[in-house]
Image (tube, coloured by chain):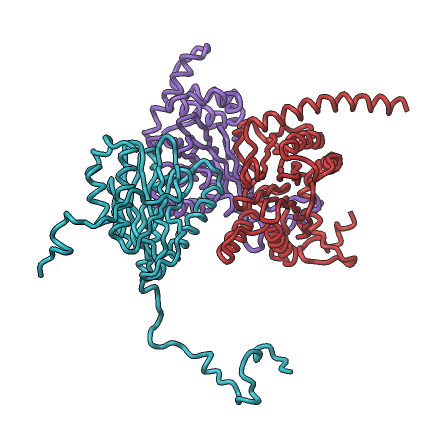
Chain colours: A purple, B red, C cyan
Amino acid sequence: MFRNNYDSDAVTFSPTGRLFQVEYALEAIKQGSAAVGLTSKNNAVLVALKRNAEDLGSYHKKVIKIDDHLAIVLAGLAPDARVLSNFLRTKAMESKMLFNRPISIQKAANLLADKAQQNTQSYGSRPYGVGLLIIGYDESGSHLFEFQPSGNVLKYKANAIGARSQGAKTFLEKNFESFDDLNDAELIKNGVEALRQTLKDSELSTSNTTIAIVGKDGLKIYEDEDVEPFLEQVTVEEEGGDDDAQDGSGDERMEEDGAAQ
Amino acid sequence: MTSIGTGYDLSNSIFSPDGRNFQVEYAAKAVENAGTSIGIKCEDGIVFATEKLVSSKLLVSGANKRIQTIDRHIGVVSSGLVPDGRHIVNRGRQESKSYKGIFKQPISIPQIASRLGNYVQVYTTANSVRPFGISTIVGGHDSQGYHLYMIEPSGVYWGYQGIAVGKGRQSAKSELEKLKLPGIKVKDAIKEAAKIIYTAHEDFKDKDFELEMSWISEEFTNGRHEFVPEDLLAEAKKYAEEDEDEDDEDDEDDEDEEMAE
Amino acid sequence: MEHDPFKWGRPDNATYGDYDYRISNAKNTEFPSMHTQQPIVTGTSVIAIKYKNGIVMAADNLGSYGSLARFSNIERLIPVGKDTVVGISGDISDLQYIERALDELEVENDYDGASHPFKANHIHEYLNKLLYQRRSKLNPLWNAVVVAGINSDNEPFLAHNDLLGVQFSSPTLATGFGAHLAIPLLRKVADKEEDVAHVTKEQAREAILQSMKVLFYRDARSSNRFSLVTIDKDTGISFEKDLKVENMSWKYAETIKGYGNLQKF
C-alpha cells in the first residue's frame, strides 16, 4: 500500500502544498457529536447533541460559557476545547478589566484563530483536535463563527459541525434565508429541527440536548428538563403541520423520522 | 517530480544534492492553488484586490475579510493558507509597533517589507518549523510616497509596480502589464483591478467567489489603508462584469479562428 | 593603532595607565532606583463643562519649565477616535507618553475591523488602569487627565483621572489651579447633573471663555493662547485652536478695597 511520507507532522508540506496533519485534525471534529449554530438579527443560538459513554455515565458537556455575551460549543477533543475556552475567558476578562466593555465577538474569534495557527507551523505541538461554533452578541449585533484547528475562522449565518452534520447543513441551507427576522423561540425551533437531521438511530431528549441562546439580554443555556419546552414545541408543530396522521407519542414519531433518513 | 522519493523533500531546511529546498517549493504550491490576489501601484495610490473563494452559501457575505491592515498606512493581502496570512500580519503589527516605539514615527514601507522578508526567511532555515504557505503583497504610503512589495515563501521580496499571486497569477500578470504602470490613477485602477480578478477567476470557474478590494491614497483616504467604499466597489464590479461578457464573446471568436486555422 | 574597538574613545593606556574598569562599572549606591519625583515641563489647568448635548473643554498652549514659559505651542487636548477628547495637565513628557499609548490603542482596536470604536467611557477606564498601575509601581505618570466625549449610551461623558489613580465624574471639571478658580464660575452655570439639561452650548462656551480669562489673570503658569473643543453628540468633535483670551482689563482696580493701597497692617 502507498505510504504517505508527508503526514507524520505539521511542519511538512506535501508535494502539492497540503498539510496532512492539519487535515487529519479536521477529521477529529467529525468524531464528536453534532452541534448546530444559527443566527437571526437579534439572537444567536446553539443546539447540540450530548453523548454519554455508557448508560450509567453522565452526558458530556457541549456548551461552554465564556462571558455573559459569549459561548462556544465543541465537537472533537473536549480537553482541547477546555484549553481554548480558558484562554478565551482570560481574554474576555482582560477586555472587561482594561476597558469595561465586553470583548467583541470578531476579536474573540480572531484570537482563537491565531492561537490555533501557531500549532500548525512548528514541530513538537500538534494542531488542536476540536472544532468550535462561537456565538455572541455585541454592539454590532449577533454573530456566529466556526473555528477549525487549521486556524481558519469563518463567519456564518448558520452552520453545523460534528458527526453527520451534513444533514443539518442541508436543512440550514434550505432555510437560513428566513432566519433573520425570527424571534428567539422560532430560531431555537429551527436549531432543534436542524440538529434532528443529524440523528440516525437516536432521538432528541431532555438528557441529550443542550440549547444556548444569546441576545441583547445576555446568554442563557438550557440543559435537562429546561429544554423540554423546546423539544415539545417542535413535535407539536410537526404534528400540526404534517399531513401524515400522527398517533402515539413524539418518540415514536422521531423513530420514523430516523428511519426515513 | 524528481523530488519525491529522494528523501530530500521530507524536511524543511534540507538541501537536495542540486541545492534546492523542496519544502519551500511545496509551500509555494499551496499559494499556486489558492485564490488570486493582486496589488497595483498607481500615480496617486495603491490598490489591493483579492478573489475570495466562497466555500458555502451559509457564509456571511462581505464578512471574513482577507485584506488586512498592519498600520494605518500599510495594507496587506496574501494568497495561500489563510491562517498563515494572519500570522504574518500579526508579525508586521509587532514590527510596526516596535519601530514606532523606538523612532516615534510610522515605519516606512521598505522597512516593513524588509523585516517581514527576513521573518519569512527564518522559517526556511530550521526543521522545527515549516515555511509560510503564502505569498504576501505589502503596500503603503510613507514620507517617500507609495510602495508595493511582494514576499514569497522563500523570504525573497521585491518591489513591484503591479503584482499578482495565486492560481490566476499568469493571466492577471499579463493584464497588469497592459496597464502601463505606474501611469494610472487609483480610481481607474480600482476598476481595472476588479476586471483582472474577474479574468483570473477563469482558473477557478467552478467555484463561487467574492471580490474584496482596498486602497490607499492621499487624496481619497488621507494616506490610510481602507476598504474601497460600497459605491466604488459596485461600480468596479459592474465594469468588470460588462467587460467579462465582452471577453466571452471574444473568446468565442478566438475559438472560431482557431478552428478555421 | 588600537585594533580593539572596545578600547576606542578611552584614555590611552600608554599615557594614563590601564583603564580602571571600576569607573564604568560603578553603581550609584545612594538610592536603589529612582523614579519620577516631580514633573519637569508642565502644562497648567484643563477645564470642562457639560451642556445639554455635549461638552466644552479648554486648555492653554503653554509648557512651563518651572516658572519659565518654556514652550508656547503645546497642544494638550488630544482627540481619540471620533467621540473622545482627552485633556491633560501636568508633566508634558508624560502627556506625550499617554498620547502615544492612546494612538497605539486606536490602531490596535482597528485590527479586528472598525466596527467597535472606543467610546469616551472606555478610554477613561483604560487611562484609569494605566495611571493606577503606574502609581502602584511608585512610578506615576505625573498628570491630571480629563476625559470628555460621548459614551456607549450616546450621552455626554465627562470624567477626571489623576496620577494617584483617583477617578470621579462631575458636570464641571477642572485640573490644577482651575479646580480653585474656574470650578466656582462653571458651577454657576451647571451645579448638578440635573442642571445640565438646561445649559446650552453657547452658555457652556461662554463660561469656559470667562474661566480661561480669569485663569490667565490669576494663574502665573498660564498663557493667553489656548485651544477649545466642543464635543456634541449630534455634530461630533470641533476644535478651535490658536484662540486668545479677549476683552481683558488691566486697569488699576481703584474701587477694590481690602488689599493694595488701602491694606492696613
Name the residue at 86% across, 23% down. Answer: B257
Taking the image as drawn, is residue C129 in sight? yes
Name the residue at 31% across, 46% down. Answer: C146
Q: Is residue B53 left or right of residue C175?
A: right
Q: Is residue C203 left or right of residue A116?
A: left
Along the viewing direction, whichever of A135 and B173 lies nearer the viewer:
B173
Along the viewing direction, whichever of C122 and C63 lies nearer the viewer:
C63
Q: Quadrant of the C terminus of chain C?
A: bottom left
Name the residue at 19% across, 44% down. Answer: C184
Image vertical order of residue C129 relative to residue C247, above or below: below
Q: Position of residue C51 (x, y in %)?
A: 28, 34
Q: Quadrant of the N terminus of chain C?
A: bottom right
Quadrant of the image occupied by residue A48: top left
Q: Position of residue B114 (x, y in %)?
A: 63, 54
Q: Is residue C194 left or right of residue B183?
A: left
Name the residue at 44% across, 32% down. Answer: A143
Number of numbered labels in the structure image: 0
Taking the image as drawn, is residue A82 in sight? no
Image vertical order of residue A156 relative to residue C19, above or below: above
Q: Position of residue C112 (x, y in %)?
A: 48, 40
Q: Position of residue B165 (x, y in %)?
A: 68, 41
Furthest residue to the left? C264
Image vertical order of residue A162 relative to residue B57, above or below: below
